[in-house]
Image: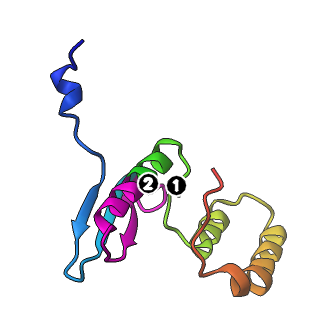
């Protein structure tokens, strides 16, 4: 049985870029960022070494699998950005909204505000 030409010449997803230091940068497209509308990429750098090229290919396959299994973040938004968006869309009484804003300002932003948002989806 022969392999069809379209399958044997299938293009690899993602790219591996050789850096001047001898390291490799692996990038895999992960879709459109839900908040910003920009392209979202998973990026990982593999340090230089004798098996760095093979390790970079392993990382590329790992990142492609994360995207396929939808285990990759769909946004690069911080918790602050998501809370701002939530408050914009919130439809509650004014006093309730003021209380939410106070709780976010006093308790959440100081602790978590600048962190990247984990993938809850």
Q: Is residue 37 visible?
A: no
Q: Are marks 1 and 2 in contact (CB under 8 Å)?
A: yes
In this rendering, the answer to whether 62 lies above or below 88 is above
Q: Earlier in the sequence, mark 1 or mark 2?
A: 2
Magenta region, residue range: 31-60
Q: Residue furthest front?
A: 50
Residue depicted at x 17% and y 33%? 9
Indicate yes or no whether the magenta region holds residue 47.
yes
Residue 3 shows in the view:
yes
- Residue 107 as seen in the image, left or right of residue 65: right
List x then y, in percent, for residue 120.
66, 55
How far apart, in angstroms, are the residues tagged by discs 1 and 2? 8 Å
Q: Choose top left, top right, bottom left or bottom right for residue 91.
A: bottom right
Q: Which mark is residue 72?
A: 1
Q: Position of residue 78 (x, y in %)?
A: 56, 73
Q: Secondary structure at mark 2?
A: helix
Q: Residue at x 20, y 19 (%)?
A: 4
Q: Is residue 82 left or right of residue 29?
A: right
Q: Is residue 118 magenta?
A: no
Which residue is identified by label 2? 63
């Amino acid at each position: 049985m022969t392999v069809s030409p379209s399958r044997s010449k299938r293009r690899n997803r993602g790219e591996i870029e050789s850096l001047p230091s001898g390291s490799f940068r692996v990038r895999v497209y992960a879709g459109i960022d839900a908040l910003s509308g920009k392209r979202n990429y998973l990026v990982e750098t593999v340090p230089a070494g004798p098996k760095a090229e093979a390790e970079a290919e392993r990382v590329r396959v790992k990142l492609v699998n994360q995207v396929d299994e939808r285990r990759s973040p769909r946004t690069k938004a911080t918790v602050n950005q998501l809370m701002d968006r939530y408050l914009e869309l919130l439809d509650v009484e004014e006093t309730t909204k003021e209380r939410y804003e106070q709780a976010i300002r006093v308790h959440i932003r100081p602790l978590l505000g600048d962190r990247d948002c984990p993938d809850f989806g």
